[in-house]
Image (cartoon, rainbow, N blue to C red):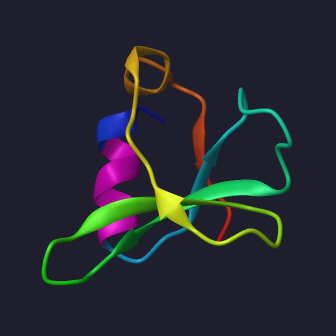
Amino acid sequence: MTFGDALELAKAGKVLRRDGWPDGDKLFCHYTGDLQPFLEVVSGDSEPIPYFTGNADLFADDWRIIE
């Protein structure tokens, strides 16, 4: 699916990832519903960090739901 589709699903509570990301089964992103909502990326047991998309992710069509 495209980034636009993935973003809407993230806003609806889904957890997402790209097939093109390294550490595929350990790296994912989700939406926070905080006062200033944003996407977070989580890798394994690491603390979540804000996710800032680049061109590769914006134009990718390999986004998928994992939860």
Q: Quadrant of residue 37?
A: bottom left
Q: Quadrant of residue 65?
A: bottom right
> Which one is nearer the viewer's eye here, 28 or 67?
28
- The spot of residue 9 in percent (x, y) is 37, 61
Above or below — where is 16 with respect to 20? below
On the picture, is 65 further left or further right than 57? right
Above or below — where is 6 with respect to 60? below
- The spot of residue 53 in percent (x, y) is 39, 34
Does residue 19 belong to the magenta stretch?
no
Q: Residue at x 28, y 63 (%)?
A: 38
- The spot of residue 16 in percent (x, y) is 57, 56
Q: Residue at x 60, y 47 (%)?
A: 64
Q: Residue at x 81, y 33 (%)?
A: 22
Does residue 9 belong to the magenta stretch?
yes
Q: Residue at x 38, y 40 (%)?
A: 52
On the picture, is 38 further left or further right than 31? left
For the C terminus, give its image quadrant: bottom right
On the picture, is 16 further left or further right than 54? right
Q: How many marks?
A: 0
> Which one is nearer the viewer's eye here, 32 or 20?
32
Q: Which residues are magenta?
A: 5-11
- The spot of residue 12 in percent (x, y) is 33, 74
View extreme (left): residue: 35
Above or below — where is 51 with respect to 44? above
- Magenta stretch mostly in which secondary structure? helix
